[in-house]
Image (tube, rainbow, N blue to C red):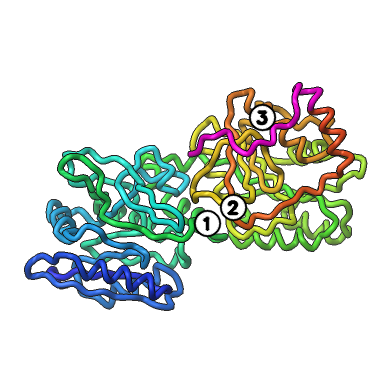
């Protein structure tokens, strides 16, 4: 092992972006007697396999695993990393941003004790991800760090046996170091006057979670259950399950498409599935029910609120309520984003996705709900009560509950997603009738304003 060498490792599929990243690496000041090398893994099957291949190829003691779209701004970062590693031989990983604990949702950014700094540069703006470390310290101990930049001074295999994809490879590696009694830390990136000066800029086009995120989240939570518990998480306290309710449509084909999409990103023990259809072949219904799927036949005389209430009564009492129209393609694990965001604080009662351009990762408070893809937190809905069955349309049924939730002090959050196309097929005459009922019940028309102004 060459203890006078740094190796920069990246999985590459964008040559232009990687070329720019290399340019910044080449501008770094190098400690006397040290050398650097760069290894690019192209056509990697997944992140862990690529990193393992590079780790075996290099004999450098200090390895820096970084995304191809990370630009190193601190020209003396190698000196700073050496100072941190040499201060304690038990330090195994140095990262730029992370959390003090290992959150039981597996998403470090949802933890109460965030650490570090980084520039996130997106297509339309740049922001500083600003967390806190005591100014007098060069670093702070962490439970996990973000995979944008992970520096190590020991080689431990990346768990490609478990994480054969592009998610949770970083949180897993942190846990592997902790299992081996090595420290994971986040660097203090403050100037002498206490001003944050991030060492890295992370250029990312988008932050849409792919359909495989939930699969690896479950694997992570199962594999590191005891470690999460010892580091401040509470894995024994399960989040409510995801409930997906397909709103009734004529076509069974689109329901099959949505079911296949769900199975691609989530294990069957992570959700409960109910579908609503106007008619279905008896044999097909039996096959579905044998597979654990609950089928509800809709009554032509029944309104949306009544149907939803029947579905809720069939569900496990701890499950959150997800309303999903089967005409909407599940191109990303939106349900995971909805559910995890609902548990950021106790005041969030419901969330929904809608069409529109917005800054990624920003949820805005809203005065209304839309029915295309909506999540009700079960504890909040239990307080608000069942859907009011006088409403025939899904639009008025969910917004009636939105008003009730807001009256109980809950927030309604929305997130704009480009290309998220949904148009309600509520009957016009039913909408007109519900409009009158809504006005009589609440004393005003349905508030159709898009946002209440705040964001998280």
Residue 28 x, y percent position in the rendering: 19, 65
Q: Secondary structure at mark 1?
A: loop
Q: Residues within 10 Å of mark 2 (few under 14, many from 20)?
A: some
Q: Quick one: 450 or 99, which is closer to the camera?
A: 450
Q: Quadrant of residue 377?
A: top right
- Residue drawn 72% across and 47% down? 245
Q: Secondary structure at mark 3?
A: helix
Between the C-alphas of marks 2 and 3, the distance is 28 Å
Q: Which residue is mark 3?
A: 382
Check residue 364 in the rendering and tell me which mark sits there, or answer none: none
Residue 50 x, y percent position in the rendering: 38, 72
Check residue 417 in the rendering and tell me which mark sits there, or answer none: 2
Marks 2,1: beta carbons within 8 A: yes
Residue 352 x, y percent position in the rendering: 63, 43
Residue 385 x, y percent position in the rendering: 71, 28
Q: Is residue 359 left or right of residue 224?
A: right
Q: Is residue 413 left or right of residue 227?
A: right
Q: Which comes before the other along the chain, label 2 or label 1?
A: 1
Q: Disc 2 vs disc 1: which is toward the camera?
A: 2
Marks 2,3: beta carbons within 8 A: no
Name the main secondary structure of what is drawn in magenta.
Answer: loop
Q: Residues within 10 Å of mark 1 (few under 14, many from 20)?
A: some
Residue 422, magenta (yes or no)? no
Q: What is the span of residues highlighted in magenta in the rendered image?
A: 439-456
Q: Which comes before the other along the chain, label 1 or label 3?
A: 1
Q: How many marks?
A: 3
Q: Which comes before the other along the chain, label 2 or label 3?
A: 3
* Image height of 111 relative to 93, above or below: above
């Amino acid at each position: 092992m060459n203890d006078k060498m740094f190796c920069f490792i990246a999985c590459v599929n964008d040559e232009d972006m990687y070329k720019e990243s290399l340019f910044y690496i080449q501008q770094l000041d190098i400690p006397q007697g040290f050398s650097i090398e760069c290894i690019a893994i192209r056509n990697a099957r997944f992140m862990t396999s690529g990193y393992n291949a590079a780790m075996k190829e290099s004999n450098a003691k200090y390895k820096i695993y970084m995304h191809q779209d990370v630009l190193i701004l601190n020209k003396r970062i190698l000196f700073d990393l050496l100072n941190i590693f040499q201060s304690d031989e038990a330090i195994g990983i140095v990262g730029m941003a992370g959390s003090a604990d290992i959150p039981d949702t597996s998403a470090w950014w949802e933890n109460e004790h965030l650490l570090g700094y980084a520039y996130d540069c997106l297509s339309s703006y740049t922001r500083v991800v600003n967390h806190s470390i005591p100014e007098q310290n060069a670093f702070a101990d962490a439970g996990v760090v973000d995979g944008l930049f992970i520096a190590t001074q020991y080689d431990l295999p990346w768990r490609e046996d478990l994480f054969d994809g592009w998610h949770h490879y970083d949180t897993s590696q942190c846990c592997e170091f902790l299992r081996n009694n090595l420290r994971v830390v986040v660097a203090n990136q403050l100037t002498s006057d206490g001003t944050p000066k991030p060492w890295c800029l992370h250029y990312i086009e988008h932050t849409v979670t792919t359909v495989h995120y939930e699969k690896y989240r479950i694997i992570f939570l199962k594999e590191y259950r005891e470690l999460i518990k010892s580091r401040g998480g509470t894995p024994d306290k399960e989040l409510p399950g995801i409930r997906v309710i397909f709103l009734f449509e004529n076509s069974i084909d689109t329901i099959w498409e949505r079911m296949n999409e769900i199975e691609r990103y989530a294990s069957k023990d992570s959700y409960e599935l109910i579908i609503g259809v106007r008619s279905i072949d008896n044999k097909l219904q039996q096959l579905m029910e044998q597979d654990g799927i609950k089928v509800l036949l809709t009554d032509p005389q029944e309104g949306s609120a009544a149907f939803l209430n029947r579905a809720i009564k069939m569900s496990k009492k701890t499950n959150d309520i997800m309303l999903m129209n089967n005409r909407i393609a599940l191109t990303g694990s939106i349900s995971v984003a909805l559910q995890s965001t609902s548990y950021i604080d106790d005041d969030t009662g419901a969330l929904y996705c809608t069409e529109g351009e917005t800054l990624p990762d920003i949820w805005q408070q809203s005065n209304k709900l839309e029915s295309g893809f909506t999540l009700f937190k079960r504890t909040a809905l239990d307080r608000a009560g069942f859907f009011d069955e006088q409403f025939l349309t899904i639009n008025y049924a969910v917004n009636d509950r939105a008003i009730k939730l807001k009256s109980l002090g809950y927030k309604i959050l929305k997130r704009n997603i480009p290309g998220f196309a949904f148009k309600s097929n509520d009957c016009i005459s039913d909408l007109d009738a519900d409009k009158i009922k809504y006005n009589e019940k609440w004393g005003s028309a349905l508030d159709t304003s898009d946002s209440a102004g705040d964001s998280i």
